[in-house]
Amino acid sequence: MNALYIAWKNLVFRPLSSLLTLLLLAIGAGIIFLIITLSSQLEKSFTSNLANTDMVVGAKGSPLQLILSSLYHIDAPTGNIPMAEVLSLKRNPQVKHLSMLALGDNYAGYRIVGTDDQFANFYELKPASGSLWSEPMEVVLGSEAAIQLQLTLADTFYSIHGLDQENDHRHDQSAFRVVGILKPTGTVVDQLILTSLQSIWKVHESHDHEESASSEGQPHVHSEDCEHDHHDHDHEHEEAEVEEDREVTSALVMFKSSLGNVTIPRMVNEQTGMQAALPAIEINRLLSLLGLGSKLLSALAWLLMLVAGLSLFIALYNSIKERRYEMALLRTFGASPFKVLVLLLNEAIILTLAGCVLGFALSRVAMLILIANLPSQSMYQFQILGPQAEEWGIIAASFVLGLVAALLPALRVYKIDVSRTLSGE
Amino acid sequence: MLEARSLQFAYPGQKSILFPDLTLHTEEQGILLGQSGKGKTTFLHMVSGLLKPSQGHVFVNGIELSQLSARELDSFRGEQIGLMFQKPVFAPALSVWENLLLACSFSSKSPDQVYMKDLLSLLNLSGKERRKPQQLSSGEQQRLSLARALAHKPSLILADEPTSALDDENCEKVIHLLKKSCAEASATLLVVTHDQRVKQSFQRSFTL
């Protein structure tokens, strides 16, 4: 009979106390595992979507909102900026690439992004079928959007104004036509519907007549429910309008060198009506805010683990008191104190490892539930991953915790006076 | 074979107890009689190496116990000595069969399972292998205690008051079984007791 089997039998013999310790360990470890996998995957989704973008310019407002809406497509845009200003920025020698975006419409919850041919410098745009857009009203679907919307080449659809699908304002004058579907990129592009800037302007021309237009050239703050059109422009001059009088929502900028990081944002913020936001800085700020929450949660989880360790300590302490006859007996069978100690430690090791495995399984089940409940057009692409390096570290740490918690009471076997214990004193 | 020579033991703050010399040759069966409180268990524990005598020597199979290191003593005991306690003590989490295996787990000899089966049937415990020890009657526990003392084929069996809780009929039975099974196992037997009923069953007897 090996020592692990004996330890296992002893654990099963005291099911309640073993189960309590096991559950405490599993819940504590599970929360820690969940936080680790969630925050690392969240961070990865955020950084993989940075897409070489050094700077985003848009209407004044919250820089974080600008980044979230233009890079991650999860918040409402801050408003509009005049295209003329963007084009003058594009001519700056520090600027390597600049791609303009026109946002604000969706189809069945998937955002339609009007952009120019520069967009391909920021994201990998390889058609899996069809081609990229060339004419107005032609769209290219991100891989995930194509699957979820069940659209194929040559299908047509009408966009809906605003960013959520519940809005009943449908642009039903002009239909979009699918001309291409992109290969998966693992970025937010997979969830988008891409088209030319002209398409977006065209869709909004017709109904601009129905809505009150804001004064020309002045960016207005985009309202929460997106009732207002941010691409509208003075319809009286529509015919005469050249492209440069148009407006866009924002622009992605890539600099020639890191020197641009220093000078351009400042120049934009001080000398133009636009706002410059640096994704790297804003995302760090966001992640550190999220990190604060996850730190608090992990502290709580470690506290739980500590309680689990304490419970292990108490359970073993009491059981050794109760089992000292048995321990003395083992000594008469020729077991050295060290062998009896190992026997007791095995119980703690089995519990701790089982707790870790159970906790790991719990964290993955929680992830499955999370994935199942996440809207499909979300930019977060969570996966069920095997144990990561950091998680192996946690397993090792809880192993040590269990061992220490068990070692203190188990060392008492060295103090058992075999003769006295057996003679019933 | 067992030899105890001029043993003394002193509990802290008490007068030394002097023990009589005692010699049992291989396969001999003897009895040590003494009133309660005279140090019977103390003697037994000294002889089995669980307690260090303050004076004197114990030889088991020609080896002096005090010459062995703590570790050597542990494994020597595990291989050569089978103990039967006054109060039956078992590992409650393990079955009857596993308790027998446990007694052999710490010696270098591998357990002889056929022999252990025979022991159980000799002691009328066949069919109870999967029970827990605490589910047995006290008579059965006593017999299991004996089976366990013999399970690893020790050369010396030391029994502490094996009959004190038994009526005359069962007393005779247990002593008969004890003698018979030790003879079959070719083990030397020393019974330590205050029970005068047992005296006539042994040729060699010593008194404290």
Image (cartoon, rainbow, N blue to C red):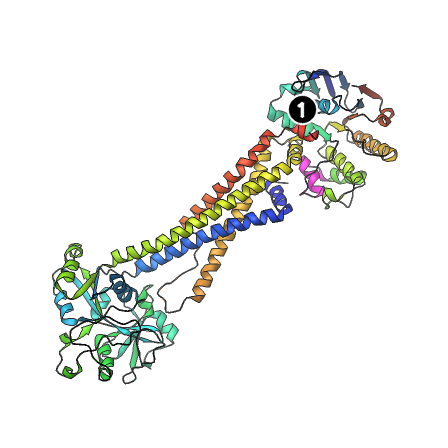
Residue A348: quarter of image: top right
Give coordinates of residue A3: x percent, y percent.
60, 40
Write the residue at 70% across / 31% down.
Answer: A424
Residue A105 location (% of width, % of height): 29, 75
Q: B8 and B75: which one is in front?
A: B8
Q: Is residue B111 magenta?
A: yes
Give the structural element (helix, strand or loop) at label 1.
loop
Q: Is residue B181 above or below residue A306?
A: above
- For this rendering, which residue is in front, A53 or A204? A204
Front in this rendered view, residue A54 or A97: A54
Q: Which one is in front, A330 or B114?
A: A330
- Magenta region, residue range: B86-113
Is residue B145 visible from the viewing direction of this image?
yes
Percent of width and height locating residue A179? 29, 77
* Residue A249 sits in quarter: bottom left
Q: Which chain does tag 1 point to?
A: B
Q: Does B52 sit left or right of A211 as displayed?
A: right
**10 Å crowding of disc 1: few (<14), some (14-19), many (20+):** many
Main secondary structure of the magenta stretch = loop
Q: Which residue is mark 1?
A: B49
| Tag 1: amino acid | Gly
Residue drawn 67% across the image and 19% down it: B53
Quick check: is B120 in the magenta stretch? no
